[in-house]
């Protein structure tokens, strides 16, 4: 009897876990391209999600050519990037390996951009934490 | 002893859950581009999966330029879209925000197309439900 | 009391499961394009991940035009593909349906390339097993 109750409790708990996970709005965006339409779409989505979901957690991970979005030299709408990085619900993250491949360092990035040693590992870690994953490409 | 048995039962149950999940063929496709090769590939995959896996559940979520696939004005192979939407295993879903951005409304879509307020939330909800995720792009 | 302990044990176990999952570096890459920049990036990532993470498990699933990466006729850097396939941590997998669509068979592939009946099913099975998912596109 106790055993059955334990299993039922476990199931209920797992269900709650799954259910609460569905209610979260946690997304990691994977950006590797520098197409301006793709960049523009991404920024519109991030902005729109934050306005509609104040509790959302968004992270944009950039590697490959995706880093152009947040470099001083190539940033599309640096003003918007800066206003978004000021919010605690969104983080822009650049892969340090990608920086090195482009002969850049952290000083070439807009203020407030985080870096990680490995962008792909950052993405799959978020996936393992239950975050949604959206590849930004078209 | 009872406790050990509870834990073992829990583990077995979790294993069954994970195992049965692997046997499902539930996929959410993320389409944001309107490239004709990409559209053609997607429709061939959906058609092929349904023929080989009658129990599959497929959902194609369109936002950004991806909505062209199912608009009256731009649809690629509207005949095939209509025959696929008639099957209960496949759903075509358009983001209402994307419709608005393109100055369109539901009457501009082929018959049988579902809409949701937020395409990205639709996708991450399916992911949280254990559906596979395939970004359609090349 | 025993029941509470069972639940707590179950939670601890689940936490360990989730925690250990975060430490894994298991990634399935989804490649459907034959753009040379995308192919070059993918090979650099695979090579770099393996060097930095000897315990990583990487699988590259190719379908659509992605199969060009490993065909005798079109392979980009066949030498690098061959040296990577020799490592047990990385597997290159081609969808047999894609081969057929391109009027090719297994003899048209570089040595050491695995094939599966359905590339999309291979990818979502890995996702269900807890592997990270990276769409390779830009």
Image: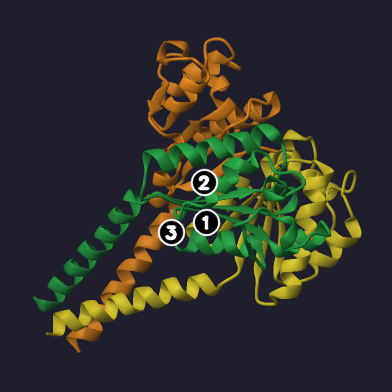
Chain colours: A yellow, B green, C orange
The part of the image, by quadrant, that contains residue B81 is top right
Residue A7, placed above or below residue C86: below
In percent of width and height, residue B63 lies at 70, 54
Work out whether C103 lies above or below B67.
above
In three-dimensional space, the C-alpha distance between marks 3 and 2, rounded to whole angstroms, equals 13 Å
Q: Chain of mark 1?
A: A
Depth check, front residue: A81 or C94: C94
C12, C110: nearer the viewer: C110
- Residue in the image at 20% along x and 70% along y: B7
Mark 3 = which residue?
Answer: B130
- The answer to whether residue A59 of the structure is visible from this angle is yes
Q: Residue C82 in the image: x percent, y percent? A: 48, 17
On the same chain, marks 3 and 1? The answer is no
Q: Nearer the viewer, residue A28 or C19?
A: A28
Q: Are labels 3 and 2 on one chain?
A: no
Which residue bears the numbered disc 2? C133
Label 2 neighbourhood size at 10 Å, few (<14), some (14-19), many (20+)? Answer: many
x then y, percent, for residue C84: 48, 23
Q: Which residue is mark 1?
A: A127
Where disc 1 sits, the SS reads: helix
Seen in the image, is B10 located left or right of residue A58? left
| Residue sitting at x 84%, y 59% | B103
């Amino acid at each position: 009897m106790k055993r059955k109750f334990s299993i039922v409790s476990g199931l209920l708990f797992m269900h709650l876990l799954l259910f609460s996970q569905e209610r979260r709005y946690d997304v990691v965006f994977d950006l590797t391209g520098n197409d301006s339409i793709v960049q523009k779409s991404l920024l519109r989505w991030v902005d729109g999600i934050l306005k509609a979901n104040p509790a959302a957690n968004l992270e944009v991970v950039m590697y490959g050519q995706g880093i152009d979005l947040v470099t001083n030299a190539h940033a599309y709408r640096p003003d918007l990037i800066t206003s978004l990085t000021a919010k605690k619900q969104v983080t822009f993250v650049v892969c340090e390996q990608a920086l090195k491949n482009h002969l850049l360092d952290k000083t070439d990035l807009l203020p407030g951009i985080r870096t990680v040693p490995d962008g792909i590992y950052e993405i799959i870690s978020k996936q393992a934490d239950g975050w949604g994953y959206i590849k930004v490409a078209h």
